[in-house]
Image (cartoon, helix red, strand yellow):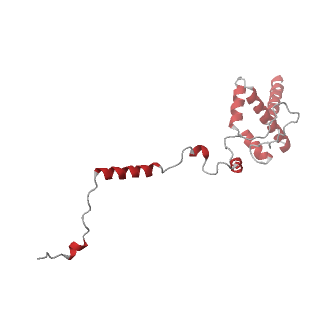
Amino acid sequence: MKKPTSASGAKRPAKAHRKTREELNQEARDRKRVKKHSGHSAGSRANGSGDAGSTAQNSKQKDPRIGSKTPIALGVTTTTPVTRQQKPKSEKPMLSPQAELDTLENDERLDALLERLEAGESLNAEEQKWVDAKLDRIDELMQQLGLSYDDEDEEEEEKQDDLMRLLKGGN
């Protein structure tokens, strides 16, 4: 009697036979041989990726580390370099004479330096030059505005008072 075959059994493939150790070793050697030849060829960095024989391509690709080839004069040149004159920097842009005089009279640095001078201290050359320039500018502005020093008026009044005292004391 025949055994009944099931439909599902017919679809199953037959059992694969196990490979022997010798077959496995041979396949491993074949895989290793194929793998050994993959990758870049030897000396690929030195030869470059493009055509090794084309000199036109090599001349186009310059080394960025190499500087300019323009000649530089090492000796003394007879031509003088052109110097650009800088615009004089003003402290306040275009103030009226009265406003400029007010700012100079209220200048804290100038006041501090004048107090040091009155106290008998000596200023260094730079500070003295700066004070002289500011005082000269104050004189110019006062002449433009037609002003005079208050000290002169006080001195005249003191002289008149002294004369009056002399006259009264002499009688």
Q: Position of residue 79 (x, y in %)?
A: 88, 36
Tell whether 64 sits left or right of 141.
left
Residue 121: percent from the left, percent from the top?
70, 23
Q: Which quadrant holds residue 73? A: top right
Name above or below for residue 32 compared with residue 138: below
Residue found at the far front of this picture? 1
Q: Residue 93: x, y in percent? A: 76, 48
- Residue 60 placed where, x, y %? 70, 49
Q: Quadrant of residue 13?
A: bottom left
Q: In the image, is 166 to the left or to the right of 47?
A: right
Q: Nearer the viewer, residue 46 or 158?
A: 46
Query: Which of the pair 82/31 is nearer the observer?
Result: 31
Q: Quadrant of the N terminus?
A: bottom left
- How many numbered callouts? 0
Residues 45 and 138: in front is 45
In the rendered image, the residue lying farthest to the right is: 78
* In this rendering, position of residue 56 left or right of residue 31: right
Is residue 163 depicted above or below 35 in this figure?
Answer: above
User: Which residue appears at 69% of the width and 40% of the height?
Assistant: 66
Q: Nearer the viewer, residue 119 or 31?
A: 31
